[in-house]
Image (spheres, rainbow, N blue to C red):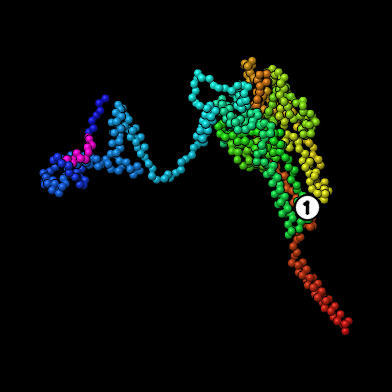
Amino acid sequence: MAQMPFRFSITRLDVCKKMKGESRKVRGRSTVPHDDSVSEAPSNQSQRYDDYEEEGFRELPPEEQRCVNAKLFLMREGSEVDGQNLYNHLSTLLTKILVEKSDDALNKLEDESKDFKREKFTYKEPFIKDNPGRTPSEVLAHAQWQMMKTACGDPKFIPNESFDLPDEDEEDIYRLIPNLMKQALFFEQAGVGLPREEFIRITTAMRELVEKWPIETLRFWGKILGTRKNYYVVEAEFKDGEYESDLSDDEGDEDKSSNDKIEDSMIFDDESTTVTDEIKPFYKPPPRIPCESLGTGLNKHVYFVCNEPGLPWIRLPHINPAQIVAARKIRRFFTGDLGEHIVSHPPFPGLEKNLLRAQIARISAATTVSPIGYFRFDDNEEEEDAEESGSNGRNTCIIDQEFEGMPLRDLCDPTGQTWCHHMQSVLPQGRNTWFNPMEGKSGEGGEEDSDEEERNEPDEPEPEVGPPLLTPVSEDQPVHDSPAWIPRISSRLVPEFAVAMLQSNTWPGSWTFGAERGRYFTSLYIGWGQKNLGGAFEPEIPPDVMEEFPSGPEITEADDPSPEEESAFKAALADKEFDAEFGEDQAEEETSDVDD
């Protein structure tokens, strides 16, 4: 490919200075314009050449002047930012092209020019605006990419080489992760569940949990929808002795109660205030119900949540009975922010993370079901121990290894006699096992207050009893005119390969499938975390205003006297003072007479 010649050439300044075989110095810049309109020098300039030669200077011919002007124009400072000029820029580009001698030099000229400008660019002034942070979508994409990269390891894969998979006999913590793809297959047959891509991300994200926590069992609990963000919930059970305590709510409550006692003492024990027992407020708050110990009851399982698979897992705090009781009296959608304050009536004692934990406990206790016969009671547990714990019957069960399963027809029985609850129900007190609030008061106080406490304390409360463990779901309370559970088959067209599905009407969004003759089953919840009340929600009415003090003449305010009554009172008081003064003078006179 022939190269087109340049229309002008940039020569060195020494070439333009040659005249008569000698190199002379040029002073100043020519005033000849840089265009083609300049013609030959006029004849009257010959004398000027002679004058300049006598002084050692000369004036260039027009052609050489245009060459010098062109070079000076190109060498002007082009930018105040990088200090580059067009002459250096073109010289660098032409030098690089001549060195490389590429056949595609014309097409590469513009790209080379941009690259050279980008390399030489320098910003002398500081930035006015800060560098904007990444958007939530970018943060999520980066987190999921790191999650996949960590799980898959080196992306280079050679198909012919085999993986070093762990042996089945070896201990592998990742075997604790459930097979969500198998569960997704059965849930898809019923038309419920999540996309497969989402199940893959959840499975990969659960690897972080088994790496950081001493987990014994792990289960994908479900997905709770929110107004701004959603919650992915994972249920875990720790090994024995690994239930460490969080920021204890018990200590906070104890501090609060102690502060209340201090405030009460400051109000009623002030030296300047005389308060009798008759006008002290007789209201006493209800006794505080302690939460169940870690690893038992409602705190047996530990729950982790995240807004998207790939983001950090956050462990939810333990639950206490007061939060369960308050959660039953309010209805509120979740926002997706665990630190959101709960504004409700009655007031909820905690943040959204506590309300989320309370709803998860309620849903788990009501919707965790299994085929009858899969679980059985432990023969080593005695019924006397169960009665002492305050539960109705036994409170633990184990898997029956001799369970042979049942046919699909029995699993889809409309009466629900073939499914049962294998998790304890939540009592109205907010616990799985009933706690007697009068036990801790027997040894408190002195002998002086024993009679008064006996008069003011109520009678012994009746123990709360819930349905026993492994109770069939057919005994659950119906929702309005509908049963609590709806069993059905996943497909009537291909019943040979169908599975049994169980849908909850009490908690819409809770599903359970049973496959392989009931030997393989699991539950999943996908919903807003709201219970089906069967009607309109009626908020709790505020209680009646209590009398602060008993009415009586001691605290009753007297009416102001009228002017006439006030005048009569002043006159009687003056007479009384006059009589007292006159009586004293008369008594002095009588004593003086006796002395005389």
Residue 419 vertical placement versus 17 (above, below): above
The local crowd at label 1, few if under 14, some if 14 to 19, many if 20 or more residues have their Cα within 10 Å, is few
Name the one closer to the observer, 120 or 81. Answer: 120
Q: Is 140 in the magenta?
A: no
Q: Position of residue 592 (x, y in %)?
A: 86, 81
Residue located at (70% from left, 19% from top): 405
Q: Position of residue 409 (x, y in %)?
A: 69, 18
- In the image, taking residue 37 as reference, residue 315 lies left or right, namely right
Looking at the rendered structure, the kind of residue marked 1 is Pro
Residue corresponding to mark 1: 550
Residue 558 in sight here? yes
Residue located at (63% from left, 40% from top): 351
Name the one closer to the observer, 397 or 120. Answer: 120
Q: Position of residue 46 (x, y in %)?
A: 11, 45
Region rendered in magenta: 8-18
**Where does the C terminus fall, quadrant-wise?**
bottom right
Q: Residue furthest right?
A: 594
Residue 198 in sight here? no
Residue located at (49% from left, 37% from top): 134
Name the one closer to the observer, 88 or 169. Answer: 169
SS type, badge 1? loop
Q: Classify residue 76 by image quadrant.
A: top left
- In the image, taking residue 113 as reference, residue 496 lies left or right, namely right
Residue 132 vertical placement versus 369 (above, below): below
Q: Position of residue 330 (x, y in %)?
A: 67, 38
Q: Classify residue 491 by image quadrant.
A: top right
